[in-house]
Image (cartoon, rainbow, N blue to C red):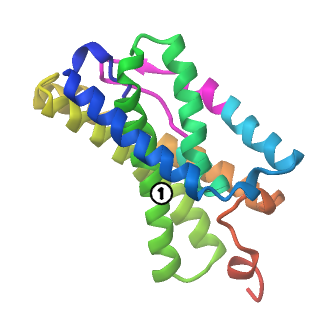
């Protein structure tokens, strides 16, 4: 899903960078900074970022623009809220861009497809579920972690494929035959990764999960 800068026109690269900066500014203004203040919270946050860097560096690929790796952004969004998930993914992408071949010009496009899209999907999906489904521990685990993780990978993969198809980088049949067929496997892995980690977190350290509220999911159940 990392799209090399040389595959896209300059207008795509700069437009994506501008959109990312708007989201970053919104995150900076609205971030609940109290969530990461304190030694334990900050240690957990930066530990998650370090783990994600290792995860993103482990990737496979078919051809330029159609490579893939697990994301872990649903976990970040549920644990720290969407603003800190965006900050974390930005740091991770800085490291992986420095280590990779995508190029700094493609930073905006890649952060949108692999960061902003799955993060916002996770947060909107959580909002909808909290208002339309029962406040149940198992709903939170299986719907907002496992299912949301899988669907966030789907959203990221489709957005990357759409951008590349729109820019004429790869024809639709090439994207469908070489990349989209792999998405179900990636969705399963992403769902399991996020779901398993959230399950452990809310079982042993629920205070680490910003979107998990005891009074909703545990008290009186």
Within the image, what quadrant is residue 125 found in? bottom left
Q: Where is residue 5 in the image (x, y as percent from the top left)?
A: 31, 17
Q: Where is residue 182 in the image (x, y as percent from the top left)?
A: 33, 33
* Left or right: 19, with 89 as reference point: left
Relative to 219, residue 181 above or below = above
Say whether residue 82 is magenta: no
Within 10 Å of disc 1 (Cα), the crowding (few <14, some 14-19, many 20+) is many
For the record, the magenta segment spans: 51-72
* Left or right: 136, with 167 as reference point: right
Going 61% across and 63% down the picture, which residue do you hit?
141
Say whether residue 65 is magenta: yes
* The C terminus - image quarter: bottom right
Within the image, what quadrant is residue 173 found in? top left
Camera-side residue of 186 and 160:
160
Relative to 218, residue 126 above or below = above
Residue found at the very far bottom of the displayed protein: 220
Going 47% across and 57% down the picture, which residue do you hit?
122
Going 36% across and 33% down the picture, which residue do you hit?
17
* Left or right: 189, with 185 as reference point: right
Q: Position of residue 112 (x, y in %)?
A: 38, 39
* The N terminus - image quarter: top left
Residue at which label 1 appears: 122
Within the image, what quadrant is residue 81 found in? bottom right
Camera-side residue of 25 and 95:
25
Q: Position of residue 56 (x, y in %)?
A: 54, 26
């Amino acid at each position: 899903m990392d799209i090399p800068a040389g595959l896209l026109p300059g207008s795509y690269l700069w437009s994506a960078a501008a959109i990312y900066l708007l989201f970053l500014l919104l995150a900076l203004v609205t971030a609940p900074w109290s969530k990461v203040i304190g030694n334990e919270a900050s240690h957990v946050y930066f530990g998650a970022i370090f783990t994600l860097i290792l995860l993103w560096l482990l990737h496979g690929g078919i051809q330029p623009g159609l490579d893939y790796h697990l994301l872990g952004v649903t976990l970040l969004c549920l644990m720290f809220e969407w603003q800190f998930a965006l900050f974390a993914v930005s740091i991770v992408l800085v490291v992986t861009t420095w280590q990779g071949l995508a190029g700094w010009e493609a930073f905006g496009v890649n952060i949108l497809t692999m960061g902003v899209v799955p993060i916002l999907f996770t947060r909107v999906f959580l909002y909808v579920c909290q208002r339309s489904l029962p406040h149940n521990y198992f709903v939170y685990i299986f719907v907002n972690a496992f299912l949301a993780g899988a669907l966030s990978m789907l959203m990221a993969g489709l957005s990357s494929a759409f951008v590349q198809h729109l820019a004429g980088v790869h024809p639709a049949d090439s994207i469908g035959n070489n990349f989209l067929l792999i998405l179900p496997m990636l969705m399963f892995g992403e769902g399991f990764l996020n779901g398993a980690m959230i399950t452990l977190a809310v079982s042993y350290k629920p205070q680490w999960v910003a979107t998990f509220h005891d009074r909703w999911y545990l008290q009186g159940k």
